[in-house]
Image (tube, rainbow, N blue to C red):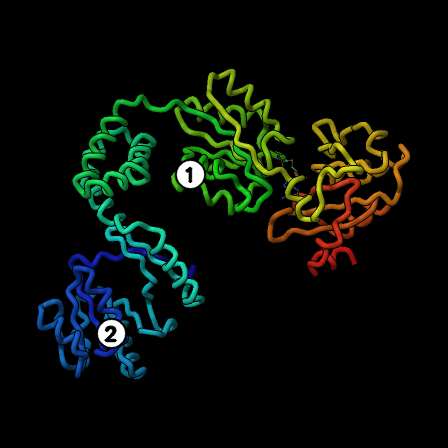
Amino acid sequence: MEHFPIFVSLAKARVLVSGGGEPALAKLRLLLKTPAAITVFAEGAAPEIAGWAAAGKLSLESRRPEAADFNGVTLAYAAEEDAGEAARTAALARAAGVMVNVVDNLEASAFITPAIVDRDPVTIAIGTEGAAPVLARALKADLEARLPATLGPLARVGKAFRKLAEALPHGRTRRDFWSDYYGSEGPRAFAEQGAAGAEAALHDLLARHSAQASRPGHVAFVGAGPGDPDLLTLKARRALDEADVVIHDRLVTPAILDLARREALMIDVGKEGFGPSTSQEQINALLVEHGASGAQVVRLKSGDSTVFGRLDEEIDACDAAGIGWHIVPGITAASAAVAAIGQSLTRRGRNASVRFLTGHDVAGFADHDWAALARPGEVAAIYMGKKAARFVQGRLLMHGADRATPVTVIENASRPDQRVLASTLATLPADLAEAEMNGPALTFLGLAPRAAALTLPALQKELA
Ligand code: SAH
């Protein structure tokens, strides 16, 4: 982020615009929405500019700006059509320590003007640092279409009510009040009765929220899915949006953590450095501590929290402390991984059941019903299976499994760095060692990638 977005107050500020043609006009149309005192320097300014000057909306000087003109100026625009003139103005501005924008010259500009969606007092600024103006325009068009025109007036009514809203306890109660206003009650009342209706709605909401005993603390066990934020459920997104505290594992991707409410306290309990990870007892204690303090806690686990997630221990801790909880299901790694190879987990005539196994558990490599798993057509999704590959291979071969049984390892399923390794029981440990997979990986016993899924060049490479 080379350009840092801020909103500059132009309430008592002076803005200097040099140039009188179309580039200057474009900036002036925006600047005239602000209370800034604007001075335009131009010989032979466009008639609109002369008109604005005559109407007292700005002052017009029919000459080039000089050094002294920059005294006390907050922002300057070098909007001359002649590049040499613009460079001269920019140099004067810089010498005076004034932030300058040189129209259509990113490198020479101290600041740039973003694409703007105006729902005053709500203003959305979109910038791409000059990389993709087309994208900025598309985003702007999208937001323009999506945001109701009443957003501005609603926000103005809301702003005037802020003092009264301070009667509500700070924090969640007040946030809920505002989210009810902007999310539902306000727009409805405004549509029916305009600004007066919106204000009446605020009074009603204030009464309701004051009366409401504050919500007790609660823990939502939320499945974050395999990593792609688009694979979050709507419920998961909503829970993240409302969370006071988010307690997450190491495997939850940054793109997903970014979706949490900005004010939420984020606690990483998967970090190395606490030992291999924060102990289960510490996690339970954190859940209880925050739940008991009245917080809306999101316990965010990768995939689905009911799959190899030690969920029951955390539920027991909540129950013992009398803290309410619920589970929001997520897409487990096996579902994402099987999608990546274009197969199904079960298939008529091949396997009527599928097992989810863990390669190792707290006691080391995990033991399973190897005789059953060794039968032809069996399908198993092995979680945490990389280190256990040789152990699993040995056990299966010992129980008579076919050496040619397909085995597929999917690393970083659903993520941009997803990789697929197609192997067989005979070659699995060697293939895995060669592939050097460092990300989370799911191993399928009894499944090969479907040929059609391999038309992707990346996958072909993996198989070569
Ligand atoms: N609750 C999680 C599993 C937790 S155990 C779920 O439902 O998916 C952690 C293991 O899950 C990892 O060792 C790996 O085997 C698997 N895993 C998690 N995310 C994965 C991903 N994006 N791609 C492949 N495997 C993944």
Residue 97: x %, y % from top left = 26, 68
Kind of element beneath mark 1: helix
Residue at 80% x, 36% y is 378
Q: Quadrant of ligand 1?
A: top right
Residue 145: x %, y % from top left = 35, 55
Relative to the observer, which residue lies in front, 203 or 411? Answer: 203
The residue carrying pointer 1 sits among few (fewer than 14), some (14 to 19) or many (20 or more) residues within 10 Å by Cα, namely some
User: Vertical placement of 105 versus 229: above or below?
Assistant: below
Residue at 26% x, 71% y is 26
* Residue 442 shows up from this direction: yes
Residue 33 is marked as: none
Residue 210: x %, y % from top left = 25, 25
| Image quadrant in which you'd find residue 135 | bottom left
The quarter of the picture where the C terminus appears is: bottom right
Relative to the observer, which residue lies in front, 453 or 347? Answer: 347
The residue carrying pointer 2 sits among few (fewer than 14), some (14 to 19) or many (20 or more) residues within 10 Å by Cα, namely many
| Image quadrant in which you'd find residue 79 | bottom left
| Image quadrant in which you'd find residue 447 | top right
Report the residue marked by disc 1. 241
User: Vertical placement of 9 versus 349: above or below?
Assistant: below
Relative to the observer, which residue lies in front, 268 or 35? Answer: 35
> Mark 1 is on which residue type?
Asp
Report the residue marked by disc 2. 24
Earlier along the polypeptide chain: callout 2 or callout 1? 2
Residue 397: x %, y % from top left = 88, 37
Residue at 24% x, 64% y is 30
Kind of element beneath mark 2: helix
User: Vertical placement of 206 versus 102: above or below?
Assistant: above
